[in-house]
Image (spheres, rainbow, N blue to C red):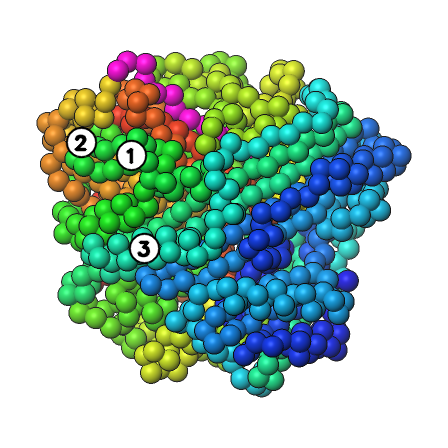
Amino acid sequence: MAIFTEEQARAILTKCVALSKADECTAELTGSVDGNIRFALNNISTSGIVSNADLAVQVAFGKRVGTATINAFDDASLERVVRRAEELARLAPENPEFVPAVGKQAYRATPTFSQTTADITPEYRAKVAGDSIAACKAQKLIAAGFLQDGQSFVAFANSKGNFGYQRASGVDYTCTVRSEDGRGSGWVGRNVQDVGTFVPSTDIRTAARKAAGSVDARALEPGKYTVILEPAAAAGLIGFMFNFFGAREADEGRSFLSKKGGGNKLGEQVFDPRVNIYADPNHPDVPALPWDSEGLPRTRLQIVQNGKIANLDYSRYWAQKQGKPATPSPGNIIMEGGTKSTADLVRGTQKGILVTRTWYIRMVDPQTVLLTGLTRDGTFYIENGEIKYPLKNFRFNESPVIMLNNIDELGKPVRVKGDEGDTIMMLPPMRLRDFTFTSLSDAV
Amino acid sequence: MHRRDFLAATGLALGGGVLPSFLGRAIAAEELQSTIDVAVKKRLADAALNAAKSAGATYCDVRVGRYMRQFVITREANVQNVVNTESLGTGVRVIADGAWGFSATNEMTPEAVAKAAQLAVAIAKANAKTQTAPVQLAPTPGVGEVSWKTPIVKNAMTVPIKDKVDLLLGVNAAAQGAGANFVNSMLFLVNEQKYFASTDGSYIDQDVHRIWAPMTATAIDKTSGKFRTREGLSAPMGMGFEYLDGNAKDKFTSPNGVVNYGLSYDMKEDAIAAAKQAQAKLKAPSVKPGKYDLVLDPSHTWLTIHESVGHPLELDRVLGYEANYAGTSFVTLDKVRERFQYGSPSVNIVADKLQTGSLGAVGYDDEGVKTKKWDLIRDGKLVDLEAIRDQAKLLGKSASDGCCYADSWSSVQFQRMPNVSLEPGKTKQSVADMIGGVENGIYIVGDGSFSIDQQRYNAQFGGQLFYEIKNGKITQQIEDVAYQIRTPEFWNACVGVCDASDYRMGGSFFDGKGQPSQVSTVSHGSSTARFNGINVINTARSLG
């Protein structure tokens, strides 16, 4: 069994905590059932289901901490995992940054679980793959894609009486469609919590249209251009930047949010005044768990307000050291925008470049969060509000901080997940001035 | 979605101490030294092989895996975490009705693995219904009962935790004493105890060891708000704890005094140098963009080889199987047939799964194929790719290249990059000789930022240390350097490779590929090499 009920989880966790002789004990039980199907060259290549459940026990003697995990839940196993954690804690050196476990909290449940997603069958996965392939075959195109879905639960309890339990679910679909001669490529990505809102037939049409439409791409000189980043293209850059919102790194002088002369940029104008970003575990489109990794309850947290830094991420250790309140780590990122779709933004563009997807984004200089990466699977030239022709892909060297100071217009936010990041975000399509492309790529 | 991602996405972790589940369970340190009796593994394997055959499989392989890892993570005077993990289980792969099927279980009983084998056959038969062409495996002779072990001197798992902690805290103190404002250091230790059996008649027991000791020194100028880092110049290796002995004979000193490392690493010495060089970076002038002749140290070149040669020559990418994630390749089967001019005549690149000390070295790959060394690029011409058993026929080969790997007993093995290395030059040439011939160049040490497109044409690389070369002399340390390449032009701009006395390996501990994503480890060797007329950009920006 991988998914435990709240009562089952509570029984196991209570036993665990009671077994510990350490100064404090936290036990966490997690379980998941994940399914996936992969296809390429218009054939299903692999499919699988993985079920798993794990119990992790962390104990502390003073500032010495030990962690052990196990995937059996009988009484002997519970005893074994607790003793093993205690043994590791006794061997561990003192951690001067140790912070005791959080006390009893009142978490407010958030809507992270959807039964329709949990009910996905192997037949459903095969149908999504089959339909994606059939739609592409009919247009003499080649599909390669991946559908993954999962349901999970997490429950934890500690010796201070804190307890939490919640279930979650999610679906992620991506499909790359290429022309038979390899000269055109399109892509679509869709991330949903409730599979009932996923319409693969519409999504695959988008990818196929971009594949067919990107054949015969023309080269444009690299340089600074007005671009429209689709939300999926913006996700890789924006998501990357939020790895560097730690107060500690900023205070230590090694972050783009460090202030010249010392201290951090909390309260300072860092972005265009139209930039408003917050986290909210109750957002209906991107619900997140009601606690963070330290057990702090999540509530709506403004991160950027009118372009000013409204909150930095203060871990419990750093908050205590600095005499500040700790902030719960965000479970999602929500950037506000306007009402226009990507197509509306295109219609309002005199000259510019539409970017479907960004790829292989890496840090070049943490001082300015300068990132490099490439466009991929559908880059188009826009003139007088229309898409005129496909463009060869570009490499960019751009900082999301600079990018969010060059905003022309923001559209309506949609739910996205980056290629490599895990954070679920609401991001608007965005028209930006002076986006820096530094070279051309021959890759299709 | 993959569980690992899902946990991270939803913030399922307690108190900052719980492990990602893919690492398996946490165990006591002394358990890391134990092994499982081969007879027990053979019994499990036979149960799976027999069950698969009875259920109608025409082929079956079984991998009984015990994957052990230890992490020791420190910053300045603090030990942040010491973690021991074990992941144990059995993966069964079959061919039935011409299609692949796979199933895995963490229950170590003959009944459980037999059940997994039956499930794998059922999945194969279901997959066969949509399969257009049956799987064809290149023949691989059974090797009977054999074993292989990484030739280590000192099993890192037997070194007491206290010694490891003392080493890292000593390194941190040395770096801080030399001017680092912050320093992070860690040890990653891996032992894969892998047992492979197949219906071809192989029972292969392997004990694979790896070590990595990354370190970062950070220097800060609070007045200007500037900060710079210098990462360690070590490489992850297929070695034991002896890698950290710091033997003098394995040190390579450049003409301007930068010390690089071969098969032995002096972590404390490097930490002191890192602190000083990070401070120097704060004051180093910014590069003027333009065309330069680049002299690349092996601690840097490994990553360029990895991205622009290793990946594009993976046959599954060439064919389109990775199109939705890692991408395809600019290399085609036609380019192999036509002996495409990948590089200049100085460029000879080999795939090698035998190389001592490398991350990819094993006796047999994860489908029981005896490993080997083979040419990929000879005298600049593309001569071969990287293929496994079910791909060999596509290249007209009669046997697999032996480069199949799975990152866990619960993952399906698939084609992964072997060690791919640039051969040293045949003519005697030192680094000083090479730099002496450069009029306007940059000498780059260590790997930095890296990014490449989905067909492996356009890449951009940074580094750790950059030195200006003027008229044959290194003049000063510079900053804000990145170079951009188009793969074939770059390798055709290679005008020389230093001789074998300068040969060293670098490597990756976390090379990602596949959906669900799997990680692999791989080494890339070279001697210092020169590339003429490469486009260098300046990466300095201002946030106002």
The reply to whether discs 1 and 3 touch (Cβ–Cβ < 8 Å) is: no
Residue underneath mark 3: B170
In the rendered structure, which amino acid carries the disc numbered 2? Pro
Q: Is residue B320 visible?
A: no
Of the pair B408 and A33, the residue shown nearer to us = B408
Relative height, residue A146 to residue A285 (above, below): above
Return the mark for residue B255: 2
Picture coordinates of residue B239, whole percent (x, y) = 47, 37
Q: Start and end of the magenta stretch?
A: B416-428
Q: CA distance from mark 1 to mark 2?
A: 17 Å
Question: Which numbered disc flags the more N-terminal residue, 1 or 2?
Answer: 1
For this view, does B139 lie left or right of residue B402?
right
Q: CA distance from mark 1 to mark 3?
A: 19 Å
Relative height, residue A420 to residue B307 (above, below): below
Residue at image coords 47%, 55%: B161
Where's the N terminus of chain B, which quadrant? bottom right
Relative height, residue A316 to residue B429 (above, below): below
